Amino acid sequence: MKASDLFIQALENEGVEYIFGIPGEENLDILESLRKSKQIKLILTRHEQGAAFMAATYGRLTGKAGVCLATLGPGATNFTTPAAYGFLGGFPLVMITGQKPIKKSKQGQFQIVDVVHLFAPICKMTKQIVNGNTIPSLVREAFRVAEEEKPGPVLLELPEDIAEEKSDVVDLIPPHERFYAVAGKEVINAAAASIKDAKYPLLMIGAGANRKEARRAISEFIGAIGIPFCNTQMGKGVVDESSDYFLGTAALSDKDYLHDYIKEADLIINIGHDVVEKPPFFMEHNGAKVIHINYKSAQVDQVYFPQIEVVGDIALSVDALADALGSKLDLDLRDFEKVRDNVKREIYRLDDEPSFPMRPQHIVSEIRNLMGYHDIIALDNGVYKIWFARNYLAFQPNTILLDNALATMGAGLPSAMLAAMIHPNRKVMSICGDGGFMMNSQELETAVRLDLNLVVLILNDSSYGMIRWKQAGAGFKDWGLEYENPDFVKYAEAYGAHGHRISSVTGFVETIDRAYREGGVHVVDLPVDYSQNVKELITDLRDHKPIV
């Protein structure tokens, strides 16, 4: 059997459905073997970055490693940002790259980059395949490593001459379910005792809690124990945010409205969060005690040094903790309820102001009304992400996709495309700033070719708005961050998509509603008024008095 055929069979053995990517001449054996597969579909993209972002989002939504393919040299190096995205965000991803023949090559060092070592700092594992007989074990190991906690990217480099050689090995290694250790009874009892002793305990939910069984366990724990909770940006949707126990989302690290209660808390139970996510609170030596519940022990940092660590399967740990506590806590929730209600009042107070260009709060409110319980929004990176994190309630897991680990621009459109692919019966919206959209806007052609139903909303301020916000906050002159955009309506139409330019609030709602009814790919150019950024996200948060 040819090694490339064995490689594709090994991927099929892992249940791979799609390979996203751009093949090169060094991948031609793989491409031919893939052509013969009855299971795996090639999703050809317009840039390797788009392919890898789609594969990482597949991993994020399914828990199974997404797979992407690139050639050597520049094709491989275009995977670096998505690799870092998966590495920091915890998204399982297997990247396959090609290489010149390693036994004998007549092209010298043309296009040669040491890809295996280049990717080592941003991958969980990187391997060059030097013998076709090792393919079954290396592919099985790659998927095991990519998918186990904390999930992340793996790179396999398959050189041209190895891919075309004959292999003697045909036996594949079957995948099996992974089981994680259970935290010991002693630490569970210690955590339970600390919770019982606390006057103002608060549950904090991070990205690592977004696992099926963990979501179930945490939701049941909150209801049974009666404890207030909040989440990080990437922890949104783990627990239904319409709950009466929901305080809010920590859109900022400090001086956000919900921090008035975070500062009152004498115990924070931190589930699934690590320091890779932007910190939702800062620990102090004389401050609140912290219980860390996660699959792995805490990475100690100057702002995070938990006193109790419950290490093991999150679902089993939380279930055990609920059993140890036994019943609902007798907590005085009056301060919590006061802050919770004031948080809602503060963040929603500008929702209904019908000004145009639209303000971020009003945009969030209208989109929340337009999207259903299970519908999905995928955010690129920009200042609007803070408004959506804070103001957009998530009722179900993975219904608001954002990145607050690498926080890269350019991922929003490919992420939404993948969501639309695997959830064709849901409304899916990509929400991008004009800057982030243009970084991978060529994938509109891919979206149209795949016949996706997708709305791409461009929040247009003709500038890098996040940096302008930071620039204003630092007291610097507004300078150097503005540019000219193309005509986004004509741009969309050039790719075969539908283009819309919004000129009123009523027109915005009507256009989005009509786009979903008609189906297809719709690009919506919406002017946005970011004048509230400094007033609401800097001045008020710097100066406002505690609500309690």
Image (cartoon, helix red, strand yellow):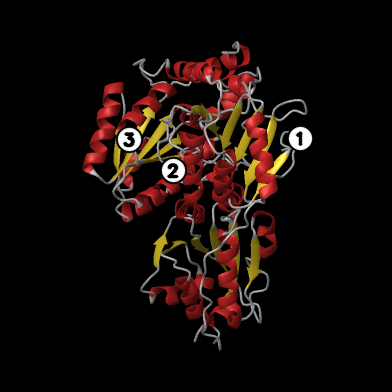
Check disc 1 and give the amino acid type.
Answer: Gln
Distance Cα–Cα, label 3 vs label 1: 40 Å
Image quarter of residue 34: bottom left
Q: Is residue 259 above or below residue 433?
A: above
Q: Please give the residue where the numbered disc 2 appears in the rendered image.
A: 397
**In front: mark 3 or mark 2?**
2
- Residue at 54% in and 52% down: 91
The numbered mark at residue 259 is: none
- Residue 208 is situated, as x and y percent measured from the top left of the image, at 57, 46
Q: Please give the residue where the numbered disc 3 appears in the rendered image.
A: 371
- Residue 170 is situated, as x and y percent measured from the top left of the image, at 51, 85
Q: Please give the residue where the numbered disc 1 appears in the rendered image.
A: 302
Q: Considering only order in the chain, which callout, 2 or 1, is on the residue closer to the N terminus?
A: 1
Residue 275 seen in the current view = no
Distance Cα–Cα, label 1 vs label 2: 31 Å
In this rendered view, identify the residue nearer to me: 325 or 258: 325
Distance Cα–Cα, label 3 vs label 2: 14 Å
- Residue at 28% in and 28% down: 509
Q: Considering only order in the chain, which callout, 2 or 3, is on the residue closer to the N terminus?
A: 3
Q: Is residue 298 left or right of residue 405?
A: right
Check disc 2 and give the amino acid type.
Answer: Pro
Q: Considering only order in the chain, which callout, 1 or 3, is on the residue closer to the N terminus?
A: 1
